Amino acid sequence: MSSLSFPIETDRLMLRPFERSDVDGLNAYHALPSVQRYVFSRTRDRAEVAGALNIMRNHVSLQRPGDTLTLAMIRKGDKQLVGHVSLHWSDATAGQGEVRFCINPAYAGQGFSREAISSVFDLAFDHFRIHRVFARCDGRNHHSIKLMQQLGMRLEAHYREHALFQGEWDEELHFAILDREWQRSTKVKDLPPRHRVA
């Protein structure tokens, strides 16, 4: 079984596991109210962000179902942390994975999320041999919806008023893409494949 080498490079980003020194960069966006709606670890202050960082620092490989690989998006030019992207191995039998991502709003709309997710799709399908990757997003997050569509993902479900968040009903959309549907990039294509995770 081959292991991953970090960082993984895209045109403008380096993707690598989180480090302790990333706490200020993560704090710059993770606790923002506009971001909190979309993250799994709720944080209100720097101490809670540091706790979330410690969890993400342990997300370094996919060895068994339930594992998560979380990578910091580091901009090449100034080494700035602009966001993070995760691949969660949700089911072994059916070869299912979930991609999750979060970006500092100061860097949104510049294509960084698309670059990072494309590389994670390459990893999911070519390295980890996952069969299907899905993503969830809030029905009001039009930027994420557009991004999922641009990546070639198909809308598979729309859950209406399925949960309350700060007194408001959430609308959750589920997008997915299969291994054979993904148009691979050239950046991660030549990684040696490991045994299928199914």
Image (cartoon, rainbow, N blue to C red):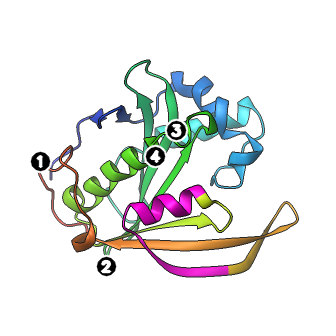
Q: Secondary structure at mark 4?
A: helix
- Frontmost of labels 1 and 2 is 1
Looking at the rendering, which quadrant does residue 112 occupy?
A: top left
Report the residue at 22% width, 51% height from top: 185
Residue assigned mark 2 = 93
If you read the primary sequence from the N terminus, does the residue marked by circle 3 or circle 2 appear first?
3
Residue assigned mark 3 = 83
Vertical arrangement, residue 2 with respect to residue 77, above or below? below
Q: Secondary structure at mark 1?
A: loop
Residue 181 at x, y = what percent? 26, 72
Label 4 near label 3: C-beta < 8 Å? yes
Residue assigned mark 1 = 190
What amino acid is labelled 1 in the image? Asp
Report the residue at 38% width, 61% height from top: 151
Label 2 near label 1: C-beta < 8 Å? no
Looking at the rendering, which quadrant does residue 161 occupy?
A: bottom right
If you read the primary sequence from the N terminus, does the residue marked by circle 1 or circle 2 appear first?
2
Residue 139 at x, y = what percent? 65, 68
Residue assigned mark 4 = 113
